[in-house]
Amino acid sequence: MYLTQGLHRHMQQRPETPAIRYQGRSLSFAQLGDRVARLAGALKDLGVTSGERVAMLSLNSQRYIEYYLAVPWADAVLNPVNIRWSAAEIIYSLDDSETCVLIVDDSFLDLAGKISAAAKTLRLMIYAGEGETPLGMLNYETLITQYEPVEDALRGGDSLLGVFYTGGTTGFPKGVMLRHNNLVLSALATFDQTGIGPQTIFLHAMPMFHIADLSAMVSLFISGGTHVVLSTFKPQEVLECIGLERISNTRLAPTMLQMLLDWRAVNPAAAKLDLSTLRKITYGASAISPALLDQARQSFSAADFIQGYGMTELSPFACILDAEYHCEEHQRSGKMYSAGVPVNCVEIRIVDAEDREVPRGAVGEIVARGPNVMLGYWNNVQATAEALRNGWMHTGDGGYMDEDGFVYICDRLKDMIVSGGENIYTAEVENAIVRLPAVTQVAVIGIPSDKWGETVHAVIVCNPGARISEQEVMAHCRECIAGYKVPRSVEFRESLPLSSVGKVLKTELRKPFWENRARQIA
């Protein structure tokens, strides 16, 4: 298995079929293959050797897809950079992975100077923008024009595909090492559920550096579907693009779904947009509330919904909840709000602190094994040993499995609140609060308490124009959940801090409460 395998097939079988549509331009498989081979030739001629790391710091674009293919074509290793990171975090990841080349677009030129001055192993920077090439950089399009195409190195199998950095909000990020086989086999194992095939027209709205979007990209590389690219996620542009480009599939984080619903709710023009071609929406990357899922299904009534649960270390899927479980019957049974069942070729267990499998229905840590599991963390033996134990990837997520094998996510173990000796799963409290009509987003965290160790604190964002009091939130929660789980304090904000794919950054919410204080749990 190798990442470029599908491109070779479609260059031969369907050379004139559109591979990418971006900013009004269309690129066929033949054209894509030629550009990829030329960029690979440039990298090799510029001194990139087997296994060296090549990074990209860019918004979504046609060139990002070319990067993902050209780097392994040149026998090198990917290092896609998180676009939300600070210069210090980016420099750390480049130095840690000993990256030799950085490709940067117009949006990040201000950072490029700081990175170039401080990064220790960078030998050259390539400008992938539309303006004048900055001093000291090489021009992406000029390289493709000037260099001849080279033969594919056919890097694949268990060789390293990329170092995908994750985290960075609490200390230094960790570089997840994924093989070609990890990504390709994960894509093949999920074809049936995600519905990606040669006729698929897929909208890339999530950031391309993220494994969730890359995994969709790999499915498209294999099947020969068409990539439609938006530079960034903007609700109006996404909804308009669906009709204009006849989009059939997309992948979104729950916060993106919420933003689409919010925009539709306040813009009369939204009713005129044609969404009838959208048949598959895969959602994931963070938990979704039952209320949001219900609203999304009503709003995008022509689309099947599929949930994907996993993490970068699992390439990325561990479980999938098929479209057939997004119905009234399984809304009543509760299965619609589960993470689904393990994907093909993946085993899941729920274990206790000693790695013993717990009974069905009991909460423990979710662990996984299969061909999707990472090689380990780059240059971090200790973190690798902690995560990969007894042949299983320890996810750090708390959950349980029902008698039918469906997995339910309770919380990140580090987000679980322990108050007076009782375990409180923040997702349960959040699901209660978000049922309030005035609430659009909520995050629940534990804050210090001298008496209880921690108490439950809710941070709420209300719908535009809506108001609700702290007392109303608490009274509502008392009707839904046990008294010890009810928030003891509530604050209201205009927005929540989010990661690049819409995960709420609870570390940022907790910081002012726990700063300069050892976390002591009663």
Image (cartoon, rainbow, N blue to C red):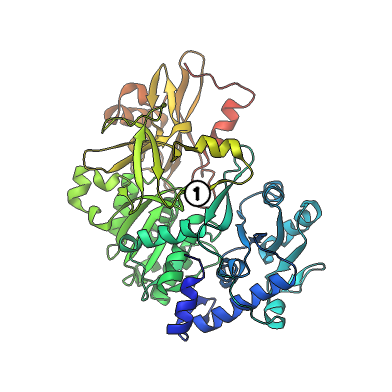
Residue shown at the point (29%, 45%) measured from the top left: 337
| Left or right relative to 420: residue 152 | right
Q: Secondary structure at mark 1?
A: loop
Q: Residue furthest top?
A: 451
Nearer to me, 292 or 97: 97
Nearest the viewer among 458 and 288 is 288
Give the number of callouts.
Answer: 1
* Position above or below: 166 against 208: above
Residue nearest the viewer, comparing 241 with 169: 169
Asked whether, in this view, residue 308 is left or right of residue 124, the answer is left
Q: Residue at x 39, y 61 (%)?
A: 264
Q: Is residue 252 left or right of residue 137?
A: left
x 60%, y 30%: residue: 512
Percent x, y for residue 29? 50, 80
- Confirm whether residue 154 shows in the render: yes
- Picture layout, residue 142 above or below residue 206: below
User: With respect to residue 179, does 438 lie above or below?
Assistant: above
Q: Within the image, what quadrant is residue 39 found in?
A: bottom right
The image position of residue 272, as x and y in percent, is: 35, 72
Q: Which residue is mark 1?
A: 374
Look at the image and tell me whether residue 508 can be seen: no
The location of residue 6, given as percent across then percent down, is 46, 73
* Residue placed furthest toward the left: 329
- On the image, the x and y values in percent for residue 496 come to 51, 43
**Looking at numbered disc 1 in the image, what kind of residue is underneath it?**
Met
